[in-house]
Image (spheres, grey):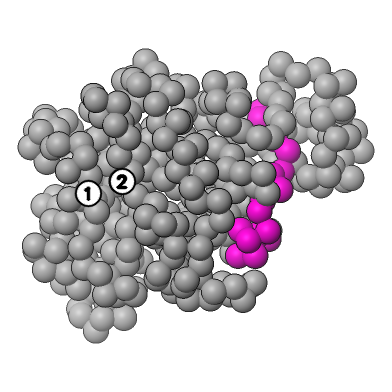
Amino acid sequence: MAGLGLSRRLRYLAKRAAAVDTANLSRLAGRIAASSGRPKPIILGDMLWSSVRHETGFQDYYDWDFHLLNRRERRTFMTHPKSNHLAQKLNRPEHRALFADKSRFNARFADALHREWLDLRVASVEELAGFLARHDRVMAKVADSLGGDGIQAFSTADIRDPEAWRAERLAARQVLVEEFLAQHPVMASLNPSSVNTLRIITFRDDQDRVHTLARTLKMGNGGDVDNFSDGGMYTMLDADGVAHHPAFDGDGRVFSVHPLSGTSIVGFAVPLWDAVGAVVERLAREVPEIPYVGWDIAITPDGPAVIEGNYNTGVFQLKPSVTGVREGLLPVYQRAIGF
C-alpha cells in the first residue's frame, strides 16, 4: 500500500515480528495442514511469507483461506494490518480517545444509544441502586476494552448490595454499566443470549460523502456477546441487509443454520434496514476528524441503536471455501479512500 508510507509499514512489520505468537501460528498452521493435506512446514512458510508480502495476520490467513488463493486473489483481500495502517493515517490521534473510551463515546453519541447507562467512577451508590431497580438485566463493561473483553451480563435480582457490587465492578475495571438492550424479535431469533449486532464500516471523504465499505451480521453462540474473538460468528450482508452465505467462527466452524436457535442464517434479512442506513449515515458525519469507523449497531423494536464506534476497526470478509467468492474487499476500500 504505497500511499500509506513505507516507514510506517516497516515499523509495523517490526513490531509484529517481535510479538509473533508462535504457539498460535503453529496451531493455525496445523489446522490448515490437517484439512488440506498439505505439509505443515509448507503452510508455515506460506503464512510467514504472506504476512510480509500481503500484510496478513495469521488469523487472517486462516479465516480467508489464503492457502487456497492464488497471488492475484490474495491481493484483493483487506487485512487487519492494512486496516490498522488506514486507521493510523486517516483518524486524527487527538480525537481517537472519544471512540476508545466507551464512557466518552456514550456521552458524545447519547441520542443514538437508546439505552440508559452509568459511569461507576462518578455515579453515587444511590444513583446505582435506582438504575438497578429500573432494569432486570444489565451489562458491565471495561471502558477501554477490545473484542468484547471484560463485558459481563448480570441479573439485577441477584445484586443484593449495590455498594459492594459497585466496588467489585470497579476492582475489575468494569466502570461502565448499561441496561441490557431489548433487541428486535427477528434479531433475537438468531441467538437470544446475546445482542446480535451489525458491524457497518464507513469512510467519510473530503466531500462529506459517506462510503459503506463492509456490512456484517454478527451473532453470539450461547455467550453474552457476539464478538468473533469470544465464540461468536459472522457473515456478510448485501446492500439490502440480506445474508446469502453461511456464518463462520474463529475456529473455522461453518453454520448455515444457527446451532442453538435453529434459525436459518442463509437468507436472513435484517429488520428495519433502511433505518440502519440512515443512522449510520448520520453517525459517520458526527466526528469529521475520525472518518474511518466500524460502527456496531443493534436493532431494537423501536429502531437501530449504536453500541460503539471502532476507530481501529476489525476486518470482515466472505470465506472463500464456504462461499466460492475468491475476491476480498480491498478494491472496495481503494475506490472509496483512493489509495
* Residue 77 on image: x %, y %: 21, 55
Q: Amino acid at mark 1?
A: Val
Q: Amino acid at mark 2?
A: Leu
- Residue 216, quarter of picture: bottom left
- Tag 1's secondary structure? helix
Q: Which residues are magenta?
A: 175-192
Q: Earlier in the sequence, mark 1 or mark 2?
A: 2
Residue at point 37%, 59% (across, down)? 238
User: Disc 1 versus disc 2: distance between alpha carbons?
Assistant: 6 Å
* Residue 125 on image: x %, y %: 84, 21
Q: Is residue 200 left or right of residue 9?
A: right
Task: State which quarter of the image contains the N terminus.
Answer: top left
Above or below, comparing residue 260 to residue 305 in the picture: below
Q: Is residue 216 left or right of residue 262?
A: left
Above or below, comparing residue 148 to residue 145 in the picture: below
Q: Are marks 1 and 2 in contact (CB under 8 Å)?
A: yes
Q: Which mark is residue 213?
A: 2
Q: Could you tell me if residue 253 is visible in this image?
A: no
Residue at point 45%, 30% (across, down)? 282
Residue 288 colored in magenta in the image: no
Residue with the mark numbered 1: 332
Above or below, comparing residue 224 to residue 281 in the picture: below
Residue at point 46%, 27% (across, down)? 99
